[in-house]
Structure formats: C-alpha cells, structure tokens
Amino acid sequence: MPNRERPGEPQPFEASKDQLLEFYKDMLLIRRFEEKAGQLYGLGLIGGFCHLYIGQEAVAVGLQSALTKNDSVITGYRDHGHMLLCRIPPKDVMAELTGRAAGISKGKGGSMHMFSVEHKFYGGHGIVGAQVSLGAGLAFSHKYNNDGGVCLAYFGDGAANQGQVYEAFNMAELWKLPIIFVIENNQYAMGTAVNRASSEDQLYRRGESFRIPGIQVDGMDVLACRGAAETALDWVRAGKGPVILEMKTYRYRGHSMSDPAKYRTREEVQGVRDKSDPIEHVKRLLDEQGVTEDELKKIEQEIRKVVNESADFAESTPEPEAAELYTDVLVERY
C-alpha cells in the first residue's frame, strides 16, 4: 500500500574480490556436494527421499552470508546447502545422508530431517510448510530473549499455499517478530508450475493483507540475494516486524531424486543453465577482477577433495546401534 512504510529497494551487494571468492567457494561446495549426494543415492547408499539444491545455490549463499552468530535458520527438506552454510562440516552432513552414527542427527534424520541446535540450524522439515510456523516460534524466542537474533525461515512456492503459513504471517506481524520469510520460488513446487497452482503467482505480495512488505529478488544472482538480505535484515532489526523475500530461482534436477521431471523440457532447463547459472555468473565477475583460470581450478580441486573425503567417510563409518532407536524420542530420557 502506498501510505505504508516499506523497506527501500535493495541494491546489488558490492562485493570485494575476497567476498566474491567466498561466494564462489560456498556455491561450488553446495553444487559439488549435491552432485556427490546424487551419485551416492544412485548407488543405493542414500535411501528414502533426497532433494537436491542444484541451481538454487545463490539464494542460500547470498542470504546466509549476511547473518550473524545470533541468527537462526529453518527450512524444508531441500536442506543440505543451508546446513553447509551454517558451517556444519560436510562429512557430518554426508554421514547423516547415508544414515550413519557419525551423522549430525546420529543417522536418524537422513536427508529430510537434519538438525543442529549448536549451529542454530533448526531443520530440515518433511511436512510442507510446517517450518514456517516453527520459524515464527524461533523469532518469538529471539524477541523474548532479547538476543538480537533474526530467524530466516525458508519455504517454497508449493508451501506458499499452506494455511499454517498465513497463521504464522498474522502472528509475526501482530507481534513484530524478527523473522524473514524466504519464499524459494523455483517455479514448479513438486511438479506443478506456480501459475497453475497459485491464483496470485507474484508471491512477494502474499503478505499484503497482513501488512507484511514483500520484495521480489533475482535468486540466480548472489549479489542481488545478499543485497536483499541486508535490506531485509535492516528492516527487521529495526523492530519493524517481518518481511517476505520472494527469491525467483530454478532447480536443475527433479523435485527429488525419484522425480523424472516430465513436466518441463530439457531445453528449458538447459536454457536456464546457459543464461542464468549462479556459479558461472560469479566466475565472470571474478574474471573481471583478474582471478585466473588456474586459481579457480585450484579452488575446484580443493572442494572436490573435501566432498570426496566426506563421501568416503560417510561410506566407511558405522551405522547406529539398534539401541539408538529408543533415544532422542523425547527431550528427557525415561
């Protein structure tokens, strides 16, 4: 509404050469980690569902690079990349994917239900949209404890039609909770194009009836994502309540590893890869900054080494003991 205060228009983040290199490393780590997870799934070493983040790396890297140690993150089941950015070691994440005792959730969470209070990462949630109301709870905790933290609550375009999302919006605005609602709009929910499932497909407008401002962001550009994060964080930290960021992004793989993705053409996916790949975009910027091909190759080798070591660890470390079935069911032990 024109008479309501709104955050300013975000500007692309002006990254130094070192910051650009950090963004590049983080996005490449997620890309290579997810490719390796896909391979292990194909080999039967990862079971159940497995949702990869390939193509969407700029969103989480841009947003989470702006967070402080007081902030919390919660997301759905496409969660591996967000965890790596919360600085959970890749071997702990990969071991969890393969259901091993050394995994971050002792091998009992798997791909969709990973968690680490220590790293302020509150899941991995398998129920579509469930994390949004939990995110409002995390934001309430930040406000109640007056710890200066902000909750980053991610959900997808498919979850944007869930009723609990709007209950969370209403509470968050009423109580001016420190939360950024991040809609990762990768265009297809599970397998239905957003304009076939959503009567209002400009998802950043979804908070209007709750007086929550929304901003639409190019989710394939890490500098646009970081710029939007700074604008949103300034607004929320000033006590003005929640904000919605709609990140227009795209996943290259199917919804999960078991999705043949017949609802779109290979040409469409290739077109996005050719024109908008977030990693290639940063590569070009680094080239302009004078970073050589040899330097980038060295980074690639280092990241592949980390990912391969995490996969080797995940394959060789033991599965949980049977008695672990009875632990962590309730907060207390009975």
Image (cartoon, grey):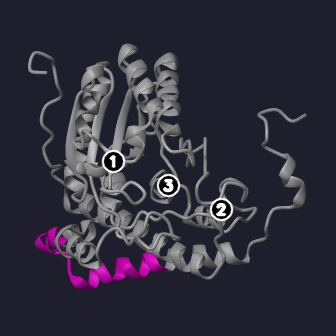
Task: Using the image, tell me which numbered label, if any, was put on residue 96.
Answer: 2
Quarter of the figure that contains the C terminus: top right
Question: Magenta segment: does it hold 253?
Answer: no
Q: Earlier in the sequence, mark 2 or mark 1?
A: 2
Tag of residue 74: none
- The number of numbered discs placed on residues in the rendered structure image is 3
x, y percent for residue 250:
30, 61
Location of residue 16 in the rendering, given as x and y in whole percent from the top left corner: 19, 57
Query: What kind of element bears circle 3?
Result: loop
Residue drawn at point x = 15 percent, y = 49 percent? 12
Q: Nearer the viewer, residue 200 or 6?
A: 200
Q: Which mark is residue 197?
A: 1
Q: CA distance from mark 2 to mark 3?
A: 12 Å
Mark 2 falls on what kind of element? helix
Name the quadrant containing residue 159: top left
Residue for point 59% across, 63% down? 49
The amino acid pointed to by label 3 is Asp
* Cα gap from disc 2 to disc 1, whole angstroms: 33 Å
Which of disc 3 and disc 1 is earlier in sequence?
Answer: 3
Mark 1 lies on a secondary structure that is helix
User: Magenta stretch?
Assistant: 284-304
Circle on res. 79: 3
Q: Name the amino acid, label 1.
A: Ala
Q: Name the dominant secondary structure of the magenta segment.
A: helix
- Which residue is more in the foreground, 273 or 71? 273
* Residue 321: x %, y % from top left: 86, 61
The N terminus is located in which quarter? Answer: top left
Q: Could you tell whether 325 is left or right of 231 in the image?
A: right
Q: CA distance from mark 1 to mark 3?
A: 23 Å
**N-terminal-most mark, 2 or 3:** 3
Q: Is residue 290 magenta?
A: yes
